[in-house]
Image (cartoon, grey):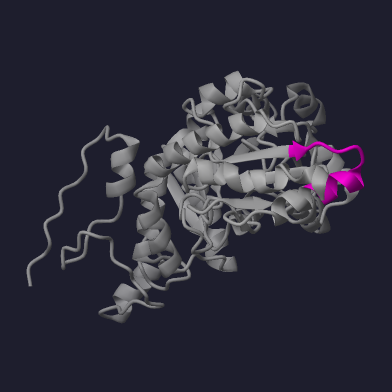
Amino acid sequence: MSDSPHRPLPAGLRPETLAVRAALPPSQHGENSEGLFLTTAYIQPDAETSAQKFSNSEDFTYSRTSNPTVRSLEARLAALEGTEAAIATSTGMSAILLLAMGTLKAGDHVVCSRSVFGSTINLFAKEFGKFGVETSFVSQTDLAEWQAAVRPTTRLFFAETPTNPLTEVCDIRALADLAHAAGALLAVDNTYSTPALQCPAALGADVVMHSATKYMDGQGRVMAGALCGSNALIRDVFGPTLRTVGMTLSPFNAWVVLKGLETLSLRMKAHSQQALAVARWLETRPEVARVYYPSLPSHPQHELAMRQQSGQGGAVLSFDVRAETPDAARAAAFHVINSTRVLSIATNLGDTKSIITHPATTSHGRLTEAQRQAAGVGQGLIRLSVGLEHVDDICDDLDRGLSTLHTR
């Protein structure tokens, strides 16, 4: 059996090409689609080779520490984000856990946007707090608050841009400058935009975090997460931690996400076009008090978002239904959601199917009311992950509830 031909990729390839081609070389069989290696262990020819490989974290020995399919995903993701390396994890939240376990210790301090995903707030505020790591939550968009929160023990800035669910956009380059001046790292959750629209490392971020469960898979099939950054961080800091604690991504999930990345650029452009059309339609509705979407000129960070996100707004928008009281707002939001017949009522996002949810009782439901208010998540807020159905069918489905709000 002859070895399969392998031609190294040339330098300077564009993201769309890297999303299809960047991976480990094919096996001796010459497969064109990356192989799925469902194995826990790897046979060694002798004890001496086994000893040598176990001393080198780059070699394949046991799939908790390394797997060819997972390694291909990591290579492709690093290529797309423009970083030296990437490390895959079992979920997006486990990626944040790995970030903290690798970079923080008792007595350290974190500055974090108060507008991030609800579980991220709980992870920093509650779980890390148990181990002596303190977190200050600040405005997503007010650089003065970030600066004022810095302490001598500050080791990490953490931001999500755009945020879930209000799509607030932070100035990545400005935050990177503040973090580095304080001797801290900047980590950016790039789940919403993905590298198809935005590359935080190019703007100064030290670590780029992903919930690959969302748009990288793209069809709501598997859970996955990742961190992207320098070799010094990924291989020397996060790698040893992952090998010890085992928040490893399964080969099958890695393979699904690897295939999802091949269409990421096409999907994100289509999602963004669809979402903008829906957002514009919602702004015309008298039942809607406000629409949150970065591509709208009414968005407070519209110009910044267009610069950072390749002129695209992404797939997620939120809107407030008009109501006089919180109770009335919640009832109105529930009515709009329950009236849909096409949209999926679920808490995920990033699917080809449009998904509608009520953040105050789902993604941010475990926060206190004070935390929800600080994050701007009211009872009348509805989040919509715009899928790839016909845009008129999406709007018609929303209209079923909006047009009957006052006839309930």
Please name the residue shown 53% across and 62% down the image: 223
397 or 131, which lies in front? 397
Q: Residue at x 88, y 51 (%)?
A: 368
For the point 42% across and 44% down, the residue is 267
Looking at the image, residue 286 lies above or below residue 235 = above
Total numbered labels: 0
Residue 246 higher or lower than 87, as above or below: below
Task: Residue 86: tell me if it is visible.
Answer: yes
* Residue that lies at the very extreme toward the left in this rendered image: 2
Image point 21% across, 38% down: which residue? Answer: 10
**In this rendering, does residue 235 appear at all?**
no
- Residue 394 falls left or right of residue 288: left
User: Residue at the front extreme?
Assistant: 407
- The quarter of the rendered structure image containing the N terminus is bottom left
**Does residue 325 show up magenta in the picture?**
yes
Does the magenta run of residues contain 333? no
Which quarter of the figure has residue 188?
Answer: top right
Give the x, y percent position of residue 390: 47, 45
- Write down the region rendered in magenta: 320-332
In the displayed structure image, the side of residue 38 where residue 208 appears, left or right: right
Q: Nearer the viewer, residue 58 or 208?
A: 208
* Displayed quadrant of residue 12: top left
Pick the front one: 43 or 296: 296
Residue 179, horizontal then vertical, whole percent: 66, 30
Q: Could you say where residue 215 lies in the image, as x and y percent from the top left?
A: 49, 49
Q: Position of residue 317 (x, y in %)?
A: 63, 39
